[in-house]
Amino acid sequence: MKNHVSLKHDGLRDSMKSEYKNAPLPPSSKEETWLNIQQGLKENKKKKVVFKPGWVAASILIAFIIGTLALENSQGDAFGWITKYFQQDNGTITQIGDSISTGESNSLPLPSTDSLQEIGTITKEEVMSLSEAQKVANFHILTPTFLPDGYELLDVNVVYGENEASNDIILNYSNQLMVQQIGGAENMGNTLLIDNEDTKVETITIKGEKATLLTFKDHTSRLIFNQLKTRIIISGSLPGEELISIAESMK
């Protein structure tokens, strides 16, 4: 008999496959696309959605992989890897996309429903120390050498996929500061749709690479950037300047 976690993963897989098969045809014009996006954001404001940790992790992984299908524009080569970044502001909505790839292929084929099943599968999630997490991570975990007064590392969340190695970890610090890192994959992508009424969007530079700083109405901030082959997301109740200082100290 399947346990609760397996049933939850099966439900996520079946839901993703159903949505993928029944996805509507794309709109005929850019204007219609933006109207649909704006309407979707308005509807989402009226809904309160609560995610369990496992579902959140699954959603993050799926979003990053599917995001690679629609990323383009400026690029810079570093150690054989290519980083692409674009930002488009349409008044009430800002769209931001970025990707990391080896540059060996200009495009990725549309995934089949069978491949979506593999993308959406998470076998387990564990909490451990940093040294333990580094042993099971499929990439070098970066840590900041700078932290504001009163902040210290508590533990690390490790999310596993189909194998025993992990491409997704979260460093949990005191005062609800989190540093998520996703690495170890040959191709990663991310696309964000941001409501400008609720969020201030800034494009900055971290170690020579473009980065996105989001400041929300509740005075929390989120910094998204790439360092070599790792995507890093720093979130917390700190001013953006503090998140930038943390990011620039990552080693």
Image: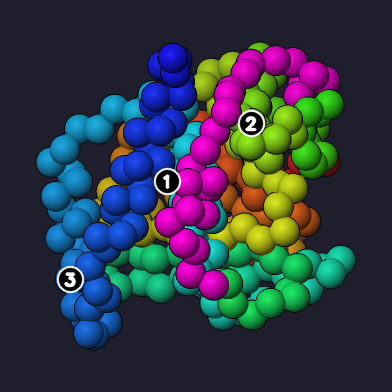
Q: Tell us which disc is closer to us: 1 or 3.
A: 3
Q: Callout 3 environment at 10 Å: few (<14), some (14 to 19), or many (20+)?
A: few
Let me know if residue 121 is in the magenta part: yes
Q: Callout 1 environment at 10 Å: few (<14), some (14 to 19), or many (20+)?
A: many
Q: Secondary structure at mark 2?
A: strand
Q: Position of residue 13 (x, y in %)?
A: 40, 41
Distance between mark 2 and mark 1 Cα atoms: 30 Å
Q: Nearer the viewer, residue 249 or 47?
A: 47
Reply above or below: 24 against 13: below
Residue type (three-letter) at the residue carrying disc 1: Thr
Farthest-out residue, front: 1
- For marks 1 and 3 on the same chain, the one whose residue lies earlier in the sequence: 3
Query: What's drawn in magenta, residue-wise?
Result: 109-133
Residue 210 occupies which quadrant of the picture? bottom right
Q: In the rendering, which numbered label is found on residue 35?
A: 3
Query: Which residue shows up at 83% across the image and 26% down it?
Result: 135
Distance between mark 1 and mark 3 Cα atoms: 24 Å
Let me know if residue 111 is in the magenta part: yes
Residue type (three-letter) at the residue carrying disc 2: Tyr
Image side of residue 138 versus residue 79, left or right: left
Q: Position of residue 188 (x, y in %)?
A: 62, 58
- Circle 2 is placed at which residue position? 160
Q: Secondary structure at mark 1?
A: strand
Q: Nearer the viewer, residue 168 or 93?
A: 168
Query: Which residue shows up at 31% across the image and 43% down it?
Result: 15
Image side of residue 198 versus residue 95, left or right: left
- Circle 1 is placed at which residue position? 215
Q: Confirm whether residue 9 shows in the render.
A: yes
Distance between mark 3 and mark 2 Cα atoms: 38 Å
Q: Secondary structure at mark 3?
A: helix
- For marks 2 and 1 on the same chain, the one whose residue lies earlier in the sequence: 2
Residue 12 occupies which quadrant of the picture? top left
